[in-house]
Each structure stands twice: as C-alpha cells, then as structure tokens.
Amino acid sequence: MNPVTTHTTLKLTRRLRRLRQSEAMRAMVRETRLSPDMFMLPLFVCEGEGIRREVPSMPGVFNLSVDEAVKEVEGAKGDGVTSVILFGLPDRKDDVGSRAYDPEAPVQAAIRAIKRVVPGVLVVTDVCLCEYTDHGHCGIVIDGEVANDPTVDQLVRVAVSHASAGADIVAPSDMMDGRVGAIRQALDERGFQNTAIMTYAAKYCSAFYGPFRDAAASAPAFGDRRSHQMDPANTDEALREVAQDIEEGADIVMVKPAATYLDVIRRVKDTFHYPTAAYHVSGEYAMLKAAARNGWIDERRAMLETLTSIHRAGADIILTYFARDAARAIA
Ligand code: PBG
C-alpha cells in the first residue's frame, strides 16, 4: 500500500504552513527585520600610522592607527553602518590609567579625525580604565580592590575628555556604582548637555570577553572582575542596575553579552521601554568565526540568525564585530 496515495486529507481550518510557501510570502509576514543603522561597529584604535594589525582570535578585526580607523569608518558608512564605538590601545599605561583622558591619546585623536572626515557617522566611546591601567583593572586599585568612588572620578575625566574631542555618545563600561550620574553632571557643567550616555547597565562577568582582552591587552594582571561585573545567574538585579542608570540620566541602556542573555534583553525592554542596546561580544564573534572556518556552520546564516535573535529579543541597537558583514549581507 502506498501511503502517499492512500492518505486521508485532514480537515484543518488552520494550516500555518500556508504563509511559508514562498520567499515573497515569508517576507510579507516577517516580524523582525535587521537594518544596517542598528549595528554599531567596535574599533580598536592604536598609536602610530598605517597600522592595520589583525587580532589573532578575532579574524576580520584589527588594531587600527587613527588614519586606518578613519578609512574603516568610511568603509562602514559605505556599507550603511552609521555608528562606531572606539576603544583605545595606548602605548603607555600607569596605575591610574591617565592616558585615558589625554587629549592626544588615540581615541581622542580618532574622534576628531572621524568627525572631520566622515561626518554623519555617530562616534561613541567606551569609557573604562582597563585598557589604560598597567594592572588591567577597570579602576583605581586600593588594597587589592577596585575602589568605587576614586574610580568614578577618573571615569568622569575620561568622559569629559571624549566629549571635548567631539564624541556624540559616551559609554561607561566599568560597572562602578554612581558613574552615570557623576558623568551626566560633569558633562552638563561643562556645556555638553547634548552628549548622550549609553550605559553598559547590565554587564555580566562573562567568559566571552576573552578575545577582546587579547585585542585590547586589558586582561587583569591579578584577580578578576567579579566584584563589579554581574553574576550571570541574575536577572532581577539587571533590572535594578538599569533602573538606577536611567534614574542617573542614561539615554540608552545596554545588556552585555547578547546571545546568552536574550532573556535579560527582553525583560529590560519590556520593563523600561528605553532605547536598548546589546553587545554581541568578542567571544560570541570568535566562536562563530572559528566554527565557520572549520566548515562546521554556514557563517552568513549563523551571523544573521544570531543578530536577528538579539533584535527579536528586544535590542534596538546591536554592537557587533559583524556590523559591516551583516550590513552587506542584508543590502
Ligand atoms: C572594557 C570593556 C570590555 C568589553 C567592552 N568594554 C572588556 C571587559 O570588561 O573585560 C568587552 C567587549 C567584548 O568582549 O567584545 N571594560
């Protein structure tokens, strides 16, 4: 007996497969769409000229001198990506991270150059000390601890320095208490009322930052970041972090990492209805790249599926090393 010719026709009123029959049909009912202007491209800016050094654990990601960073931003703009976030790789570090607020340091120089050469692209800056301290911690270390209040003073200097150089948005990523309010107040006092704050509000103590610490030479020389970054087990606490940062004047709130914290993104979006960003971090990028290079997954599909899931979870803005690739893929 041939089951194909002898089957019964089910009396189904609802057949959900009807709307999946063709690409035109699927596109018409698609609920979530990516667009290049939601991608923010992270860039690592180093000292020197003509430098474009690939990060070994992050294929396609480079340490760039200011001139090369400008070219990268021009390329990104050509792809439709309209925001970049800058990280600095200083050639000298000290125990208080003073190069982070040096007007002649790579990030400050890059802000000025990008603003001059590629107008229309939003320049965001990561505000933290870990790339600038010789011990690799995100703040001032006193008696083996990252001391909150003295660190906030330093972060304020960094944020003001970035705003003075022309940053559109400053993004504190340190997870000290009270830094958003302190930065807001200092910016306002100096006439930078229009400089926005995107806070790394719910930043988890994650294993997925490994390749970034390679790229930025910012791994802590001793200890870890558990005294300030969040425990991956918590989500109510993430809401408290976000509430506090909004209270202190944050304009955009971020969850980080992204793909392993989709539930947190959704709760933050549904609770606060604020512009919500998610950072698809270095380790998340490196995993996909490594699997694709081995031929184990289709890179383009895995990339778009991951970014779609982050947007679907509620993120309006996605910080991703795939920004240019993804923008080109959906063009
Ligand atoms: C700085 C900072 C880090 C990242 C963004 N800002 C590193 C860290 O907290 O150790 C990680 C980004 C990534 O992994 O892509 N504090």
Image (spheres, rainbow, N blue to C red):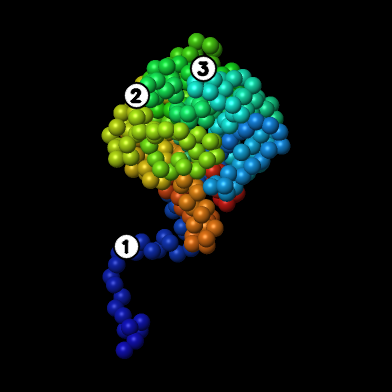
CA gap between label 2 and label 1 equals: 46 Å
Marks 2 and 3, how far apart at CA = 21 Å
Dividing the picture into quadrants, the one containing residue 3 is bottom left
Which residue shows up at 52% across the image and 53% down it?
Answer: 289
In the displayed structure, 234 sits above or below 143; it is below
Residue, far right:
50
Instruction: Please tell me whether mark 1 sits on a helix, a strand or a loop.
Output: loop
Q: Indicate the amino acid at tag 3.
A: Arg
Is residue 190 visible in this depiction of the protein? Answer: yes
Mark 1: which amino acid? Answer: Arg
Q: Is residue 190 left or right of residue 69?
A: left
Tell me how far mark 3 sits from mark 1, CA to CA: 61 Å
Q: Residues within 10 Å of mark 3 (few under 14, many from 20)?
A: some
Image point (52%, 60%), residue name: 294
Sequence-wise first label, 3 or 1: 1
SS assignment at label 3: helix
Q: Cβ of disc 3 within 8 Å of ligand 1? A: no
Relative to residue 249, is residue 49 depicted above or below?
A: below
Question: Going by the image, does 93 lie left or right of 151?
Answer: right
In the rendering, at what x and y percent does residue 209 appear? 45, 40
- Residue receiving disc 2: 244
Give the amino acid type for the residue marked by disc 2 in the picture: Gln
Q: Nearer the viewer, mark 3 or mark 1?
A: 3
Contact flag, marks 2 and 1 (Cβ < 8 Å):
no
| Residue under label 3 | 157
Q: Is residue 42 above or below residue 309?
A: above
Dots 2, 3 in contact, CB < 8 A = no
Of 51 and 85, nearer the camera is: 51
Res. 2 image quadrant: bottom left
Identify the residue at image location x=50%, y=49%: 286
